[in-house]
Amino acid sequence: MLFHETIRVPADRIGVIVGRNGRVKKKIERLTNSSLDVNSEGYVTITNREDSDDPILAWKARDIVRAMARGFSPRNAFELLDDYTRLLLISLRQAVGSSPSQLKRVAGRIIGENGRSRKVIEQITETKICVYGRTVGIIGRDPGLDYAQRAVNMLIDGAPHGAVYSYLEKMRREMNRMRAQLWE
């Protein structure tokens, strides 16, 4: 089955996807058995190789490119190679409109002072979060991914940080309880 998809990437993220001397691009191609065509206008075309027996690897290549396009480092984006790790994108424009001041205010709430809110959400939910432009990207596994999405949505909707942290602590206890049950 042939996979062929083109993704528009912000111009300032092309260099991240290509990497120094093309290293990142080559690594994506090698690990996903696909080929990437990156042009200077900001388009990346992903195609799985004909000898590829796993078309899902091309989807993973697409998700890795999308993650890097939305501000994630290559190291964090490569976590998407794991079968249970997913990328989730939340549009701030859909949530709060296109007012630059509203977008900036909401992005600031999610990041928090000195990045504190983002770090707390990442640590408790075992996810990676990136606020870039008008999107919030989350890389993680369930159930942490769902909890992080809920926490970000609470902040977007104007919930006090204390309420979000209380929710996250409750979810951390739930995650720990679920892990303990797995090992019983």
Image (cartoon, grey):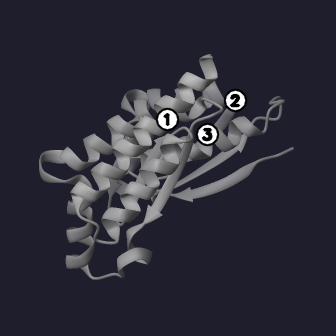
Q: Which residue is mark 3?
A: 61
Give the quadrant of residue 135. Answer: bottom left
Q: Residue at x 53, y 41 (%)?
A: 64
- Of 95 and 151, which appears nearest the observer? 151
Q: Residues within 10 Å of mark 2 (few under 14, many from 20)?
A: many
| Residue 34 to residue 180: above or below | below
Q: How many marks?
A: 3
Of residues 41 and 89, the one drawn nearer to the viewer in this rendering: 89
**Quick one: SS at disc 2?**
loop
Image location (x, y in percent) of residue 144: 48, 41
The numbered mark, 1 or 3, whose residue comes first in the sequence reads 3
Residue depth check, mark 2 versus mark 1: number of the one nearer the observer: 1
Q: Which residue is mark 2?
A: 33
Q: Is residue 145 left or right of residue 129?
A: right
**In this rendering, would 86 be left or right of 67?**
right
Tell me the residue that label 1 is attached to. 175
**Which amino acid, mark 2?**
Asn
Residue 62's place in the image compared with 80, above or below, is: below
**Residue 129 can be seen in this image:** no
Q: Residues within 10 Å of mark 3 (few under 14, many from 20)?
A: many
Residue nearest the viewer, comparing 156 with 93: 156
Residue 65 percent location from the top left of the image? 52, 45
- Whether the residues at callouts 2 and 1 have beta carbons within 8 Å, the answer is no
Mark 1 or 3: in front is 1
Q: CA distance from mark 3 to mark 2?
A: 9 Å
| Residue 52 quadrant | top right
Say which label, 2 or 1, has the lower sequence index: 2
Q: Which residue type does callout 1 highlight? A: Met
Inter-mark Cα distance, 1 to 3: 29 Å
